[in-house]
Amino acid sequence: MFVDFSQTRVFEYLPKVIWPACYATFAMLLISLLLSTVIGIGIAVVLTLTREEGLSPNRYVYRFLNTLIDAIRSFPAIILIVVFTPLTRWIVGTSVGWVAAIIPLTIVAFPVIARLIENALSEVDKSVILAARSFGASNAQIIGKVMFFEAMPTIVSSMTFASIQLLANTALAGAVGAGGLGAVALTYGYQRFDDAMTYAVVCILSVIVLVIQYAGRIVYRLIK
């Protein structure tokens, strides 16, 4: 599609709009990724321990957490971002801006991360776990020093996927007042019919995705 660059204001917006939006996007991505990873790992560990064939089976705890994760994952991200607006306003004091967006983005991301890490841990060879148990290892030692160690390459690949999905959600959050590159593409590109602005944001997001994928591949190869 032909883009008339003579009508665009991309270069004018670059220092005042696009760079601040990049900062907001990176801040939303990194902080919500950190928080959702911490929560996701905790839930994944509990699910791994309490499942039927786990180290400490508890069907009630497992069913509750499993249902919670499935329930949150069943809703589109944009719906959850809107639904949790009152909670965001209560915690942060506002529902507008990238700081406020961290709350719903974390809630959207942690079930995905929890499920990915649970699946990675469940793929660990059972014979390795039995061997660790035979040497007297505790559940905490088996989880931390055996299962996570064995599953780390899969976890890295899963976290790469989760990071890219979370980046997409930051763009969605921009449509409901979160700011960032998504808001720039919508406000300065789509609504003002500036196709070059829209494509510029798409290119920036594409570069970020490529960087995440490249970094993920490097880490994967180092620990494989």
Image (cartoon, rainbow, N blue to C red):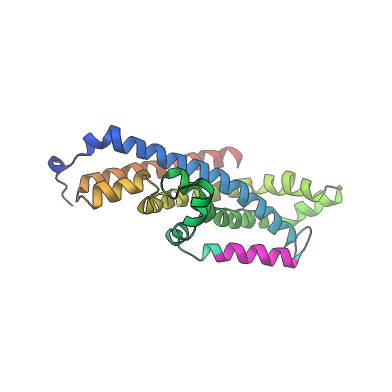
* Image point (43%, 52%), residue name: 169
**Of residues 163 and 67, the one drawn nearer to the viewer in this rendering:** 67
Can residue 202 be seen in the rendering of this structure? no
Whether residue 108 is visible here, answered yes or no, is yes
Residue 67 is a magenta residue:
yes
Where's residue 58, x and y in %?
Answer: 76, 64
Seen as rendered, the residue at the extreme top is: 15
Residue at coordinates 16% horizontally, 41% vertically from top-left? Answer: 5
In the rendered image, residue 88, in percent from the top left (x then y), is placed at: 50, 52
Would you say residue 70 sits in the magenta stretch? yes
In the picture provided, is 55 more to the left or to the right than 80? right
Q: Nearer the viewer, residue 69 or 191?
A: 191
Query: Number of labelled discs?
Result: 0
Residue 184 quadrant = top left
Please provide percent x and percent y for residue 177: 38, 50
> What type of secondary structure mainly makes up the magenta span?
helix
Residue drawn at (71%, 49%) of the image? 147
The magenta region covers 59-71
- Figure quadrant of residue 44: bottom right
Classify residue 184 as left or right of residue 210: left
Screen quadrant of the C terminus: top right
Is residue 222 found left or right of 138 in the rendered image?
A: left
Q: Is residue 77 left or right of residue 3?
A: right
From the top left corner, tell me how far across and down residue 99 is, in percent.
46, 43
Position of 126 relative to 196 (above/below): below
